[in-house]
Image (cartoon, grey):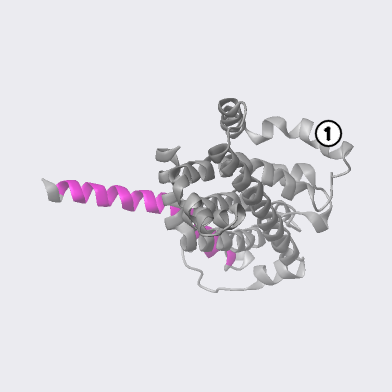
Amino acid sequence: MKFAARLVLSLACLIAAIVALGPIFWAISTSFKPTNRIFAVPPEIIPLSPTFAHYSRLIAEGVQWAFLNSANYAVLAVLLSLLFGTVAGYALTRYPVAGKPAILLIFVGAMAVPGFSVLLPTQLLASELGLYNTYLVLPLLYAGHILPFAVWVTRAHFASIPRELEQAAEIDGYSRAEAVWKIVLPGAKPALLASATFGFLHCWNDYVTGTTMVDQPELRTLPVALIFFQGFHGRDWGALMAGVAIATIPPVVVFLLFRKYLIGGFADGSVKG
């Protein structure tokens, strides 16, 4: 009976892996196929005549600048969200903030609101402030998207760290800021890395905000730039799939490096919060 259950579970995991990884494998395979073999019948699962022509075209078109834009926007947004999220999470844990339940409810409500539902008023506000179509608009908006999650998760971890540890450090001569830096923040490392990982993945994969707030080619993110790759007879699927393969690398690397913190941060935050 146990063998049958394990077999069924293994088969279910195998099917789930094929469904999840199949499109990625096909995109990578297509990116190495010559243009005249992309729609070959029967399809070539593994390219018989692999080529780097599609990747060369992407570089010639300047895809590396869109790649750098996405990376810069994501990193800046993560740093901003962690800075303000950590301060807010600590304040909501250690200080008697007036209206604390209402503030926490606002953060939870902000996470529940779909970003595309407020794109129009956000675009109008960005235009009024002179931020539309600038280098700062996307990092600021992305940071705003990540901030409620960062506050919620870091607050849960700060609440699990006894206040007595900070008091003991202050008795030993540490200032309040030094106690927070050397005692509290190291204990909240899983929460900080979980927030950073979640935030980076959110920013990197965004398309709707990027295409709404920026229309200058030199400011486009990678997902937006890939949509504009056209061939002589329509969509250049080879170049597009090459771009998909390139765009997949950073999220995979980030997830593999920080997956234990991501899972641990979510689990601990959900329990302690």
The location of residue 86, given as percent across then percent down, is 60, 47
- Name the side, left or right, on which 87 lies relative to 170: right
What's the magenta bit mostly, secondary-structure-wise?
Answer: helix
Vertical placement of residue 244 versus 198, above or below: below
Q: With 216 as the anchor, is 175 left or right in this view?
A: left
The 10 Å Cα crowd at callout 1, few under 14, some 14 to 19, many 20 or more, is some
Q: Is residue 27 above or below residue 52?
A: above
Q: Quadrant of the C terminus?
A: top left
Q: Is residue 155 above or below residue 246?
A: above
Depth order, front residue of 137/155: 155
State the image coordinates of residue 69 (x, y, percent, origin top left): 73, 59
Q: Quadrant of residue 129?
A: top right
Q: Looking at the picture, which amino acid does disc 1 mark? A: Leu
The x and y percentages for residue 40 are: 54, 60
Tell me where the magenta segment starts and ends, as one range.
4-31
Please report the residue visible at 61 percent of the width from the left and 26 percent of the height from the top.
99
Residue at point 47%, 62% (across, down):
256
**Dot 1 corresponds to which residue?**
124
Q: Is residue 42 visible?
A: no
| Left or right for 148, reference 272 | right
Membership of 109 in magenta stretch: no
Label 1's element? helix
Quick check: is 21 in the magenta stretch?
yes
Q: Quadrant of residue 247?
A: bottom right
